[in-house]
Amino acid sequence: SQKIEQNSEALNIQEGKTATLTCNYTNYSPAYLQWYRQDPGRGPVFLLLIRENEKEKRKERLKVTFDTTLKQSLFHITASQPADSATYLCGFTDNYGQNFVFGPGTRLSVLP
Amino acid sequence: EAGVAQSPRYKIIEKRQSVAFWCNPISGHATLYWYQQILGQGPKLLIQFQNNGVVDDSQLPKDRFSAERLKGVDSTLKIQPAKLEDSAVYLCASSSLNGNTIYFGEGSWLTVV
């Protein structure tokens, strides 16, 4: 069955450093990979999407990579700030917007 | 543009009671999803509609959960009878037809006591 793993339940880093979150998948060949941010008590908010034929996508301080050989995506937040503290979810879907599945999430804490 | 609307935001019920959640997707979005998110876990898909037809309900516990989207717009998710393990956040999301990004509502928090 499909399985999505995110590197750790929680990640603590110092303000100003780069946070790197990992998402690995098995038994799945996604066409699109998305990263979402979820704050406590709120619904997930879409951040970035990357296609299977793209290696890297950037948006402001965010960068996502997608390696279909390793079956892995890396999500980077550069110059991290305490306001970046949240849970980050990776999600996959196929070409038709079907079969939208999510990983368990990584809770990021950026310490001042 | 208005986002995905859900109600109620919070609900506390006793086990064996019933509860219903309502969702209004983003205008024009053909696909609607209901997810269950247990504390500390990622969202788990319960059911996916495209217009008013069911695309995937393989993980919906059909003995107690039901969902409908009669006119292809609003949707209702019902749980009857509720169990303690149904305590979770029920997230509604929507996307455009064949869209690859889904947009979530704020969720309906259910506590079963």
Image (cartoon, rainbow, N blue to C red):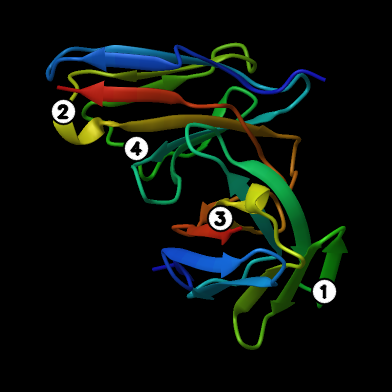
Q: Position of residue A41 (x, y in %)?
A: 48, 32
Alpha-carbon neighbours of circle 4 within 10 Å: few (<14), some, or many (≥20)? Answer: some
Q: Which mark is residue A89?
A: 3
Residue at point 59%, 22% (across, down): B52
Q: Position of residue B98 (x, y in %)?
A: 74, 44
Secondary structure of the residue carrying numbered label 1: strand
Q: Determine which residue is flagged by label 1.
A: A56
Looking at the rendered image, the quarter that the N terminus of chain A falls into is bottom left
Secondary structure of the residue carrying numbered label 4: loop
In the displayed orientation, state which residue is furthest to the bottom: A69
* Chain label for disc 4: B
* Chain label for disc 1: A
Discs 3 and 1 share one subunit: yes
Q: Determine which residue is flagged by label 2.
A: B83
Marks 3 and 4 sit apart, C-alpha to C-alpha, by 22 Å
Q: Position of residue B67 (x, y in %)?
A: 42, 22
Name the amino acid, label 1.
Answer: Glu
Secondary structure of the residue carrying numbered label 3: strand
* Chain label for disc 3: A
Given this view, does label 1 or label 4 mark the residue nearer the observer?
1
Does the CB distance between marks 3 and 4 fall below 8 Å?
A: no
Name the amino acid, label 4.
Answer: Leu
Q: Determine which residue is flagged by label 4.
A: B60
Residue at point 87%, 58% (across, down): A60
Marks 3 and 1 sit apart, C-alpha to C-alpha, by 18 Å
Name the amino acid, label 3.
Answer: Leu
Does the CB distance between marks 1 and 4 fall below 8 Å?
A: no
B84 or A88, which lies in front?
Answer: A88
Q: Which mark is residue B73?
A: none
Residue at point 44%, 70% (across, down): A8
* Chain label for disc 2: B
